[in-house]
Amino acid sequence: MMETKGFDKLFAPDVLKQLFPEDRSDQFFDALYGDVEEGAYDISLEFIGSRGNRLEFMLRLTQRPGKCITCSLTYGLPEVFTRHPIINIKGLVQNIEALLDGRGRCVDWQLGPTQEVSNDVHIIPLGIALKS
């Protein structure tokens, strides 16, 4: 079993904002629609915790004022996010591994299905398998 103490500090909110900057949502919508204003939500990265040899994160989609997150087909996003170069989940996981500083290697990752937390917040789970 891997030592997972200190992961809450390692993946503090300010660190997560560096891993997944706030302007990435705008870059994504600019690439997708050619217009930042078309984006219905902001995307942020949150650390949930660790279980066994897994790190659990989530991509939080928060509805933008005057927009409709429910209308924006968020259920297809895990597949889109998996491949999209701006969202860059593969690069994100590599950066997370670098933060581990030898405490573990990220050997696999997967995005779960979109979950509706409320009318204005949807989440996409990101699980990362670790190996010592």
Image: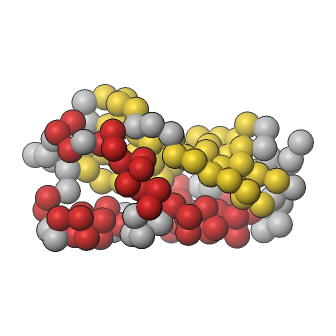
Question: Is 88 in front, or is 9?
Answer: 88
Question: Is 32 in front, or is 104?
Answer: 32
Q: Position of residue 96 (x, y in %)?
A: 64, 63
Question: Is 8 in front, or is 74?
Answer: 74
Point 83% across, 60% down: residue? 103
Point 59% across, 41% down: residue? 48
Point 20% across, 44% down: residue? 72
| Left-right relation of 40 to 105 | left
Point 33% across, 44% down: residue? 76
- Quarter of the image that includes the N terminus: top right
- Quarter of the image that includes the C terminus: bottom right
**Up/down of 116 relative to 30, above or below:** above
Q: Is residue 14 visible?
A: no
Question: Is 31 in front, or is 60?
Answer: 31
Q: Position of residue 116 (x, y in %)?
A: 35, 30
Quadrant hosting residue 54: top right
* Residue at the limit of the structure toward the left, as seen here: 66
Quadrant hosting residue 56: top right
**Up/down of 81 relative to 86, above or below:** above
How many numbered discs, if any?
A: 0
| Left-right relation of 35 to 103 | left
Q: How is the image coloured?
A: secondary structure
Q: Is residue 110 visible?
A: yes
Q: Position of residue 124 (x, y in %)?
A: 44, 42
Q: Position of residue 104 (x, y in %)?
A: 81, 58
